[in-house]
Structures are given as structure tokens and as C-alpha cells.
Image: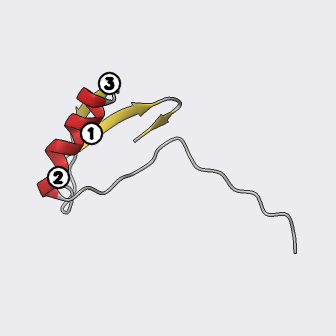
Amino acid sequence: MENIRFSGGPNIAIKIPKIKYEATVAFYRDVLGMEVEERPISHPTVSRTHRVKFGNNVL
């Protein structure tokens, strides 16, 4: 078997149910103190999206 290596990219998508969305955004912003910014989106199945800075990555 070959040595297979892989790693994650800089952007990590997290799907959050609508009913828990506000509480999840507030947790990252208010409890963890992460930089949170709402971003515009035009997608038929995504109602809102936020950019959360997490070290070198973006959630």
C-alpha cells in the first residue's frame, strides 16, 4: 500500500439547522470570542452564511 497523505483546506463548511443557527453564531462570537462576519449569499438552499475566523482557517 502506498503512503497516502491528505490534509484539510483553509475553508471548513459547517451545516447548522435553522433552529440552532443564531445560537451557534452567538456561541462562536460571544463565548469563544472569534471574529464573525455575515456574508451575502445567493443560493437556493442556503438562507444565511457567516465567516468565522479560526486561526489560519475559516469556518
Could you tell me the amino acid type at mark 3?
Gly
The vertical placement of 28 against 48, above or below, is: above
| Residue identifier under label 3 | 33
Q: Few, some or many C-alpha atoms within 10 Å of disc 2 (few <14, some 14-19, many ≥20)?
A: few
Could you tell me the amino acid type at mark 1?
His
User: Which residue is painted at 35% across and 53% down in the image?
Assistant: 14
Could you tell me the amino acid type at mark 2?
Lys
Q: Few, some or many C-alpha atoms within 10 Å of disc 1 (few <14, some 14-19, many ≥20)?
A: some
Q: Tell me if I can see residue 39 in this picture.
A: no
Q: Tell me if I can see residue 10 in this picture.
A: yes
| Residue identifier under label 1 | 50
In-image side of 47 versus 37 (left or right):
left
User: Which residue is painted at 40% across and 30% down in the image?
Assistant: 53
* Residue 8 image offset from top left, x and y in percent: 59, 50
User: Which residue is painted at 76% across and 57% down in the image?
Assistant: 5
The numbered disc on residue 1 is: none
The numbered disc on residue 20 is: 2
Could you tell me which secondary element the residue under label 2 belongs to? helix
Could you tell me which secondary element the residue under label 1 belongs to? strand
* Residue 45 image offset from top left, x and y in percent: 20, 63
In-image side of 2 versus 12 (left or right):
right
The vertical placement of 23 against 3, above or below, is: above
Q: How many angstroms separate mark 1 from mark 3 (CA)? A: 15 Å
Task: List the single residue furthest toward the bottom.
Answer: 1
- The quadrant in which residue 46 appears is bottom left
Q: Does the CB distance between marks 2 and 1 fall below 8 Å?
A: no
Viewer-proximal residue, 44 or 59? 59
